[in-house]
Image: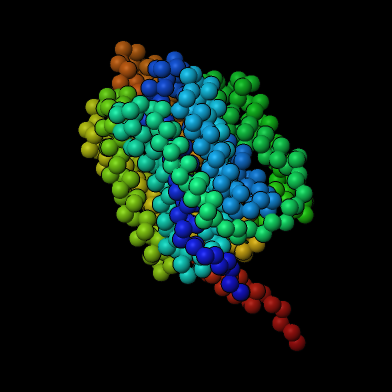
């Protein structure tokens, strides 16, 4: 039976959804290049300023689990239009902000809109295109997921140097207005509206669980691990997530159907995606700080230095998408993580206050050459194992954990970066600010390199869903009792 839902303009729908998601994901890292400017303008430290990124991801992590429920209550058009309108309001509020709290609130509102759009995009694309075209379409979507946060620092660097950081939001706002008008006309409903019962307790447990976890990781950059500000939300988050999982497994209509994790390639694909997102967002917050603070490069020049890596992503994504159906995920993911590991080892070895810029450019290109081969194939391979009725739950679960991983990656990267700086200042009390900052970034790349090693180990277990079924069938055959 075909899993495709026929709509009049599938490519137009996909374009609107992907552009909306691109703007939202671009917003994840767009302020990274402006963090030093924001820190100076509003007199805040790096540990506080990083909440502009971590807070954004935290909202996504809280909201995305609810997306599967929203898709059963509201039409596709309603969700897309309102997601864009909420994102627009957040962008305008951030652009008009006169202090740090208002800027942070604007980011939170914008993230709320993105949290609605992301799972809808993934679910709709899976439904409106046939399986035979899914590799190419997911290749384009993989480009959106990886390129948007990676391109954030590059584009924002140019905007900051020419117009100022508020224009990051004004430009996004203009695009949101145009996209909202377009969506109201072109988007048609593809979801099945069943209006299941809303379980408030599940929403509360999910919010406390993911919120507590990310808050604890983010606070570690400012206070010691032994502080109640860290361990109280950490323990509350872990307990809440445990209770959330137990409750979902016992409900007839769960908020997130945890049955998706009974499919091994979906679980593995989600884990690999999380590791990839963690590397992308950890790198995306560290490199702008390093290029501007240690190498003393302007925002525009720093952004342009990251452009070749993004160009590799643009070129490789459609190639990987077109070859995915022929080659499968395993070859791509293993090869990809080898390049990711190589890129991070180079960063780990060469970063200093005197590093030639070309070495950073080369390492970044190698890193994204690998990440492009990791992200889309692992995501598509995982989702391909799910039956159609679990697409919405699968996309919600995958997107939730991706945002949690992104927030964790950003928070831990800043925490390790701060620890590295403190350690270096103890050993070299007379070092200048550029040397201290470079040492902190280098220290953080030890952590990101370790994540790359874990990803490479996971990639060795990737298989096609069809291969699993064949092996299962053989196993069942060989274990059948012999009848006399």
Residue at image x 58%, y 29%?
215
Residue at figure coordinates x 43%, y 42% from the top left? 175
Q: Nearer the viewer, residue 260 or 137?
A: 137
The single residue placed furthest to the top in the displayed view is 430
Q: Is residue 206 left or right of residue 18?
A: right
Q: Where is residue 298, by image quadrant?
A: top left
Identify the residue shown where x is 76% and y is 44%.
Answer: 199
Whether residue 333 is situated above or below residue 243 in the rendered picture: below
Q: Is residue 398 visible?
A: no
- Name the colour scheme: rainbow
Q: Residue 410 placed where, x, y %?
A: 47, 34
Locate the N terminus by quadrant. Answer: bottom right
On the rendered structure, is 20 left or right of 116? Answer: left
In this rendering, does residue 327 appear at all?
yes
Front in this rendered view, residue 140 or 475: 140
The residue located at (64%, 77%) in the rendering is 477
Nearer to us in this view, 445 or 6: 6
> Which image quadrant is residue 327 in?
bottom left
**Looking at the picture, how far across and down is residue 389, in whole percent?**
65, 62
Q: Position of residue 320 (x, y in %)?
A: 38, 60
Q: Is residue 261 left or right of residue 38?
A: right
For the C terminus, which image quadrant? Answer: bottom right
Task: Give percent across and percent down for residue 26.
Answer: 43, 40
């Amino acid at each position: 039976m075909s899993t495709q839902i026929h709509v009049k303009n599938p490519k137009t729908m996909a374009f609107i959804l992907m552009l909306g998601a691109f703007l939202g994901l671009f917003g994840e890292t767009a302020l990274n290049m402006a963090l030093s400017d924001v820190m100076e303008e509003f007199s805040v430290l790096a540990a506080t300023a990083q909440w502009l990124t971590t807070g954004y991801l935290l909202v996504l992590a809280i909201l995305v689990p609810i997306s599967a429920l929203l898709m059963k209550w509201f039409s596709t058009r309603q969700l897309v239009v309102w997601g864009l309108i909420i994102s627009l309001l957040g962008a305008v509020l951030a652009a008009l902000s006169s202090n740090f709290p208002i800027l942070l609130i604007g980011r939170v509102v914008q993230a709320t809109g993105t949290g609605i759009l992301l799972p809808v995009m993934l679910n709709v694309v899976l439904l409106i295109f046939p399986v035979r075209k899914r590799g190419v379409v997911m290749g384009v979507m993989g480009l959106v997921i990886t390129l948007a946060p990676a391109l954030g620092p590059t584009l924002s660097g140019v905007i900051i140097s020419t117009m100022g950081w508020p224009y990051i939001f004004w430009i996004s706002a203009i695009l949101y207005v145009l996209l909202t008008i377009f969506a109201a006309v072109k988007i048609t409903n593809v979801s099945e509206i069943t209006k299941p019962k809303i379980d408030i307790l599940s929403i509360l447990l999910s919010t406390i669980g993911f919120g507590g976890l990310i808050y604890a990781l983010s606070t570690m950059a400012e206070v010691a691990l032994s502080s109640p500000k860290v361990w109280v939300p950490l323990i509350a988050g872990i307990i809440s997530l445990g209770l959330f999982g137990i409750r979902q497994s016992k409900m007839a209509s769960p908020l997130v159907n945890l049955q998706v994790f009974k499919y091994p390639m979906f679980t593995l694909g989600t884990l690999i995606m999380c590791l990839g997102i963690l590397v992308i967002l950890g790198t995306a917050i560290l490199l702008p700080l390093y290029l501007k603070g240690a190498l003393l490069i302007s925002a525009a020049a720093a952004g342009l230095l990251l452009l070749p890596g993004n160009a590799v992503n643009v070129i490789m994504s459609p190639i990987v998408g077109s070859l995915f159906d022929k080659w499968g995920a395993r070859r791509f993911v293993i090869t990809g993580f080898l390049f990711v590991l190589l890129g991070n080892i180079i960063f780990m070895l060469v970063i200093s206050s005197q590093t030639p810029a070309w070495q950073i450019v080369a390492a970044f290109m190698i890193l994204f050459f690998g990440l492009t081969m990791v992200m889309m194939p692992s995501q598509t391979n995982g989702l391909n194992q799910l039956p159609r009725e679990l697409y919405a739950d699968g996309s919600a679960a995958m997107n939730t954990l991706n945002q949690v991983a992104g927030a964790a990656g950003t928070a831990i990267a800043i925490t390790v970066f701060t620890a590295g700086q403190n350690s270096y200042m103890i050993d070299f009390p007379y070092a200048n600010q550029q040397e201290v900052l470079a040492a902190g970034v280098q220290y953080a790349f030890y952590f990101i390199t370790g994540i790359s090693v874990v990803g490479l180990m996971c990639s060795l277990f990737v298989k096609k869903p069809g291969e699993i079924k064949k092996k299962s069938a053989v196993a069942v055959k060989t274990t059948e009792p012999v009848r006399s």
